[in-house]
Image (cartoon, rainbow, N blue to C red):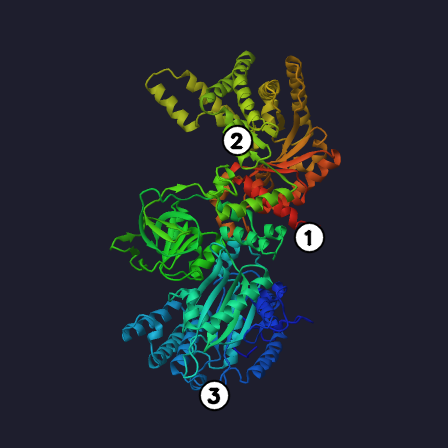
């Protein structure tokens, strides 16, 4: 590269033998995203399709990795760039920065996965004090040339030299104010020339150097800046949010400039720039969707600085270019067989394609588009299933606003990303993050967002902007995150400095006032609007039927994807449910049984007193009386549960938590006893309770007297529960039901514990069978939630008919984390520092916890080939974890009722993407 004093570039460069670091657009294709990044690979693909792409070349992600790892560019990179630049200059018939007829280029980032606005771009590279004169002469347009030059200095100063972008914005605002105009297009050539002088002074003062006049130095520095932008805070935050690996690096695309801000001539009209979608990314409907901005360069549209016009208006503005664009869009959608997101520029009537990619879309659009493409014969059902996700399905199950109630609508913008969001209005990202961490729900309100707003966008319930369209930064990023967003609400006057928003009629919304935004309609309301269930939840509840008159297109699409997923999946999906109401709802949502019934939830409320009596019992008779009182209540619980899940398995976990959890809080109880003593009031029972609390107090209850240990230490506790289960099963059999109970022993660490409890359980079941004359088939298994249990699973399987992995506790014991303590203390720091890509309690830690699950599954089945394997931790409803459980051969996952549809869908996706499938 150039002989500049950039501190990032070493004297010699880093040598990597035999590696090609630069590819011409004619050399790549869309399958080289790992090497060329998404943008470079797709520019190459469009070039190969014969579409009008400005000539250029791509510097690979491998070059970026070398640069970031070693601090120097690869030794061969300069020569390769020079060779490709020579070829580009020959093709264009002019040289980079040539004074009389300059070639100008853009330098753009382009990672494998789209990261909109997160990394850096510099346009108009090659302009200088000399070449701007040549550009003006060649273009016959002084204003265009000086506008391009001020853009370069502004973008280069901020991106490459680290100058505060607000300084340039303030100078631009001052120039407009002096001219008494409101938009930059109204500034004339003389105004822009003065602005260039001002911008150069800002660079000199803030960066401590002159703006570089050598065009090659400009390009080299811009390339390094793009490499460096991979590791900016906002890029790292976005990757963590989207779970994009940090070691991919970015490619750099060097492309000859075409100009949408080049004015008209006597023989040709001017131009503009735009972003288009082959289908609506918000709804999935077919039509003409996108934004167009006359007399503009590419970054103007996504920045939301000026409000665009709908793409359909291009037909009246420039019909020839419009018709050509429609044809190209059809070509690209048929070629990629998916929704395509396209950036284009029109230069004096000549259409140029600057980028295409498979477009981000909302959850509803994803389901609609997937089924539409199947109906068009472009993809099959398996590919359609791959293109929708459990996370998207979960978004569709969120509630929506109830507009039948009395609401006060104060504005309407563009429905950029659906959802119903309610929160306090905040006007900057710092406040959004601060308030969110304090437990407040907030709506981030801005004139337009930029990449620096990312942390606030993540923290907010929704985003509202007064500028920009469906392709603005706010819209694109919000859709990618599944965040509710309304853009371009022009009738709302947003004043970020005074932290307020004025709505039509003069009402002022101050920071902290509640507002509601509807990303499906674009409507903005004052106050909190009530919500109603989504139509997708109505469908799962059985209150909306596909094919019926009231079923909408979205419900039909969801139904088709769910039906196909159910046909393909191997994993069964059960529910975590502790009562008949939850069991029935889970069954409506498609549960194939209960994988976890937590019996401790049955000992709360009025029954707590019985448990207290059990804990306080001084004699065997007192203990037996307490257990005798609990038995019929437990039996009734199980009868209702077995009835609700008739014909399906119900796994009942015997009492797991430490007994002190059923006693009053020690502080509250101590105060009660002290007050009673001071008033000389009777307090014998409270005193006994307090003594019991002290007796049972543990420093670390999670690792104390709980689970199987309770059953071994408290005589009769587990046998009472087993008897209740057996008697309930017998009662259901007598009522012609089909109970399929499974008894799960928790927290086993050694086979001997399980053998003792199982021996007692088998004895009780035999007694119930004899007493009722009913043959019961009750499976007895255990919960694998300790590392030792996983490591000795082969031995434990000798006494267990099934394993259910308790991945919540297994995660705690493998990591040495107390979840209640660590999530609030240092998890945020671990996520920010990249130690965690995602919390191990949210998605299973494949390398640690996952390895133990895999080892235990294999060892258990080696001992008992018919061993049934499931998981009942929260990971059972996590999309990524479901794929892991499919891979290691589990039979089922179990999760909360609301997450059952998500698990069903992901189990189907796991089946069609697993090894051996045609779709991978």
- Where is residue 890, by image quadrant? top right
* Alpha-carbon span between mark 2 and mark 1: 37 Å
Residue at mark 2: 584
Q: Nearer the viewer, residue 120 or 755?
A: 120
Figure check: 476 above or below 787: below
Determine crowd level at label 2: few under 14, some 14-19, many 20+ residues with C-alpha closer than 10 A: some
Q: Is residue 783 above or below residue 199?
A: above
The N terminus sits in image quarter:
bottom right
Residue occupying the point 64% across, 44% down: 568
Q: Looking at the image, which is closer to me, 350 or 79?
A: 350
Q: Which residue is under mark 1?
A: 918
The residue lying at 42 percent from left, 77 percent from top is 270
Which label is found at residue 100?
3
Between residue 674 and residue 718, name the one nearer to us: 718
Mark 1 burial class by Cα count in 10 Å: few <14, some 14-19, many 20+: few
How packed mark 3 is, by other alpha carbons closer than 10 Å (few <14, some 14-19, many 20 or more), is: some
Secondary structure category for the residue under label 3: loop
The percent coordinates of residue 731 (x first, y second) are 59, 18
- The percent position of residue 634, horizontal first and vertical second, equals 54, 21
Looking at the image, is mark 2 or mark 1 earlier in the sequence?
2
Q: If you read the primary sequence from the N terminus, does the residue marked by circle 2 or circle 3 appear first?
A: 3
The image shows residue 714 at horizontal and vertical percentages of 58, 21
Q: CA distance from mark 2 to mark 3?
A: 78 Å
């Amino acid at each position: 590269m150039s002989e500049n004093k950039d501190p990032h570039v070493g004297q010699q460069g880093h040598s990597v033998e035999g590696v090609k670091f630069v590819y011409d657009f004619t050399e790549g294709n869309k399958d080289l995203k790992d090497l060329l990044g998404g943008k470079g690979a797709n520019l190459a693909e469009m070039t190969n399709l014969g579409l009008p792409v400005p000539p250029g070349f791509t510097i690979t992600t491998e070059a970026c990795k070398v640069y970031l790892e070693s601090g120097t560019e690869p030794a061969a990179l300069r020569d390769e760039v020079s060779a490709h630049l020579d070829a580009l200059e020959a093709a264009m018939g002019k040289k980079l920065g040539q004074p009389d007829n300059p070639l100008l280029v853009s330098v753009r980032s382009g990672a494998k996965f789209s990261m909109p606005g997160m990394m850096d771009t510099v346009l108009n590279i090659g302009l200088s004090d000399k070449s701007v004169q040549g550009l003006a002469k060649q273009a016959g347009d002084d204003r265009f040339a000086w506008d391009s030059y001020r853009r370069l200095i502004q973008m280069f100063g901020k991106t490459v030299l680290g100058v505060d972008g607000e300084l340039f914005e303030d100078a631009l605002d001052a120039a407009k104010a002096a001219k008494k105009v409101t938009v930059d297009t109204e500034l004339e050539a003389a105004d822009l020339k003065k602005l260039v002088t001002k911008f150069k002074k800002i660079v000199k003062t803030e960066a401590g150097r002159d703006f570089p006049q050598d065009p090659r130095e400009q390009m080299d520095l811009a390339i390094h800046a793009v490499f460096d932008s991979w590791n900016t805070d906002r890029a790292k935050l976005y990757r963590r949010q989207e779970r994009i690996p940090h070691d991919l690096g970015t490619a750099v695309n060097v492309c000859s400039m075409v100009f949408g801000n080049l004015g008209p001539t006597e023989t040709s009209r001017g131009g503009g720039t735009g972003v288009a979608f082959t289908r609506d990314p918000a709804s999935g409907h077919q039509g003409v969707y996108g934004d167009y901005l006359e007399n503009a360069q590419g970054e103007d549209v996504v920045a939301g600085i000026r409000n665009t016009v709908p793409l359909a208006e291009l037909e009246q503005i420039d019909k020839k270019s419009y018709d050509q664009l429609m044809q190209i869009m059809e070509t690209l959608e048929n070629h990629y067989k998916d929704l395509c997101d396209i950036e284009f520029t029109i230069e004096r009537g000549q259409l140029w394609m600057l980028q295409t990619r498979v477009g981000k879309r909302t959850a509803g659009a994803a389901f609609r588009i997937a089924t539409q493409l199947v109906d068009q014969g472009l993809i099959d059902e398996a590919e359609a299933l791959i293109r929708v996700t459990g996370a998207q399905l979960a978004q569709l199950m969120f509630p929506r606003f109830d507009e039948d109630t009395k609401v006060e609508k104060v504005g309407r913008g563009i429905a950029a990303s659906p959802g119903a969001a309610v929160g306090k209005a905040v006007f900057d990202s710092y406040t959004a993050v601060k308030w969110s961490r304090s437990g407040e729900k907030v709506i981030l309100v801005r004139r337009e967002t930029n990449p620096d707003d990312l942390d606030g966008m993540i923290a907010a319930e929704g985003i509202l902007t007064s500028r920009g369209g469906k392709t603005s930064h706010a819209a694109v990023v919000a859709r990618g995150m599944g965040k509710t967003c309304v853009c371009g609400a022009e009738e709302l006057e947003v004043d970020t400095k005074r932290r307020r928003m004025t709505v039509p009629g003069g009402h002022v919304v101050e920071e902290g006032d509640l507002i509601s935004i509807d990303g499906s309609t674009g409507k903005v309301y004052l106050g909190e609007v009530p919500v109603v269930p989504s139509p997708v939840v109505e469908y799962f509840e059985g209150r909306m039927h596909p094919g019926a008159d009231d079923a909408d297109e979205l419900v039909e699409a969801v139904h088709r994807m769910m039906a196909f997923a159910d046909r393909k999946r191997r994993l069964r999906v059960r529910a975590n449910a502790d009562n008949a109401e939850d069991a029935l709802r889970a069954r409506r949502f498609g549960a194939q049984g209960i994988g976890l019934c937590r019996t401790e939830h049955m000992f709360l409320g009025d029954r707590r007193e019985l448990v207290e009596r059990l804990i306080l019992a001084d004699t065997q008779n007192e203990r037996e009386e307490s257990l005798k009182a609990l038995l019929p209540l437990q039996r009734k619980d199980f009868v209702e549960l077995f009835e609700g899940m008739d014909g399906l398995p119900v796994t009942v976990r015997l009492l797991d938590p430490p007994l002190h959890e059923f006693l009053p809080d020690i502080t509250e109880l101590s105060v009660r006893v002290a007050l009673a003593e001071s008033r000389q009031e009777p307090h014998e029972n409270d005193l006994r309770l307090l003594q019991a609390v002290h007796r049972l107090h543990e420093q670390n209850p999670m690792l104390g007297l709980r689970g199987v240990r309770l059953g071994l230490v408290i005589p009769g506790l587990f046998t009472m529960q087993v008897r209740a289960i057996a008697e309930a099963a017998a009662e259901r059999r007598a009522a012609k039901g089909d109970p399929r109970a499974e008894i799960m022993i928790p927290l086993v660490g050694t086979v001997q514990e399980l053998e003792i409890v199982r021996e007692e359980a088998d004895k009780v079941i035999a007694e119930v069978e004899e007493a009722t004359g009913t043959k019961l088939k009750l499976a007895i298994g255990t919960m694998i939630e300790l590392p030792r249990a996983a490591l000795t699973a082969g031995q434990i399987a000798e006494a267990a008919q099934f394993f259910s992995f308790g991945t919540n506790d297994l995660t705690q014991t493998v990591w040495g984390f107390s979840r209640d303590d660590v999530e609030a203390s240092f998890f945020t720091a671990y996520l920010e520092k990249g130690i965690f890509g995602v919390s191990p309690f949210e998605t299973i830690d494949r390398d640690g916890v996952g390895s133990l699950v895999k080892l235990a599954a294999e060892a258990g089945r080696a001992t008992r080939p018919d061993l049934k394997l499931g998981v009942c931790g929260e990971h059972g409803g996590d999309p990524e974890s479901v794929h892991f459980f499919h891979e290691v051969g589990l039979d089922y996952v179990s999760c909360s009722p609301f997450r059952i549809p998500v698990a069903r869908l992901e189990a189907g996706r796991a089946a069609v993407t697993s090894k051996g499938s045609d779709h991978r």
